[in-house]
Image: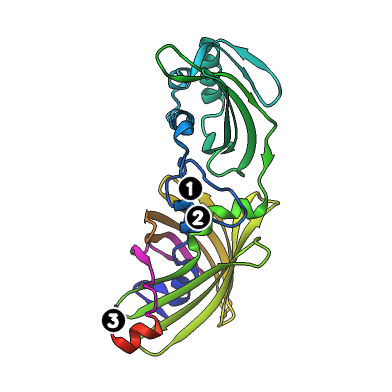
Amino acid sequence: MIRYGFPIWFRAFSIGLSLLILGSSPLALAQDDDSSPATDAEESAFEVPEEEKPFWDSAQAFVDAYSARDAEAIGNLFTEDAEFFDELGVSTTGRDNIVARYQYAFESSPEAVIESIHIEGVRHLSDNMAIEKGTVVASASADSPRFLAHYHAIHKLGEDGTWRIHVLRDSPREELGRGEQLDQLSWMLGDWINEDPETTVHTSCDWSEDGNFLLRQFTVMTRDGLQMNGVQRTGWDPIHKKLRTWTFDSEGGFFTGFWTKSEEGWILTSAGVTASGETVTSTATYQIIDSEMVIWQYTNLIIGDAVHGAGEPVTMVRSAPSPSLEEEATGEE
């Protein structure tokens, strides 16, 4: 069945998959990077100790400057005679040389991304010296696998009262595991709904027991009483180094697609076959509005030999929680 210019099964197949990391932008400082996401209560319970705030502020300034490709701003986070050891052990001495090195890095790797910095601890060696250790989550580009790198930094307190990096030493990078790569899409967890005057799609998502996949179930209802349901499994493809989705509907259709990061969310390119044997290829974009709303729109859809124009934007929102039995009995909210 086709409604509003696209098949009902395509609506179910494409419903709102996108990016939300730790409830904020990709540049937010990570507070946890386990294979399964932290709960809201766990995240809200974290508070930066007062004595560590200058170092967390410095870390955020580093992430922001890297995103802006501002080598001078990065240089201002170091002392004049600072020393930087990269993951290969190559040393760069002096603020000016460190600035030049980052300028070269931005020119040679223009798409590199520092996603987050997590400070694991700060220990004061004296009144004006402190050592910090932590991890960085980064990637060669928005569409490349994320990796983790440990670092140690010695900070020195300047006469102006500002803590600056005096020595920075990076360790060799480690590619993140499949669960940690998949954590980029952990926003899907929970119950969602999108609807128009004739169709309602409900979805529910949870982690697989092993933490290697996100598992979704979806149900499509129409005013005509038609119903379709299906399952979707999303995981990390270690060969293509991409997040991948496999979808199976109750009518016998099946599809697979790869995810690519974009500035506003994600782009999904997909291919598959309907239960009637028609081949399908599509491209869809997903825009993150906030933690409660995502807007998706397909920009290219080919079913068999028929080429469809761009579809209308579709809004998906989180479902309201069901009332408790006590609330139902008393009528209270």
Q: How is the image coloured?
A: rainbow
Question: Would residue 136 be found to the left or right of residue 294 on screen?
Answer: right
Q: Which residues are magenta?
A: 299-323
Q: Is residue 300 above or below residue 29?
A: below
Q: Position of residue 17 (x, y in %)?
A: 48, 61
Magenta stretch: includes residue 321: yes
Q: Label 2: which residue?
A: 42
Magenta stretch: includes residue 58: no
Gap between marks 1 and 2 measured at Cα = 7 Å
Q: Compare marks 2 and 3 and give the one earlier in the sequence.
A: 2
Q: Compare marks 3 and 1 and give the one earlier in the sequence.
A: 1
Residue that appears at 48% across and 47% down? 46
Task: Pick the quarter of the image with the C terminus.
Answer: bottom left
Q: Is residue 258 above or below residue 328?
A: above
- Element on which disc 3 rests: loop
Q: Are marks 1 and 2 in contact (CB under 8 Å)?
A: yes
Q: Label 3: which residue?
A: 332
Gap between marks 3 and 1 measured at Cα = 33 Å
Residue that appears at 35% across and 65% down? 315
Q: Position of residue 29 (x, y in %)?
A: 48, 40
Residue type, numbered disc 3? Glu
Of 138 and 234, nearer the camera is: 138
Q: Is residue 56 visible?
A: no
Of 286 and 134, nearer the camera is: 134
**Residue 140 falls in which quadrant of the image?**
top right
Gap between marks 2 and 3 measured at Cα = 29 Å
Task: Pick the quarter of the image with the N terminus.
Answer: bottom left
Q: Position of residue 64 (x, y in %)?
A: 43, 32
Residue type, numbered disc 1? Phe
Res. 46 mark: 1
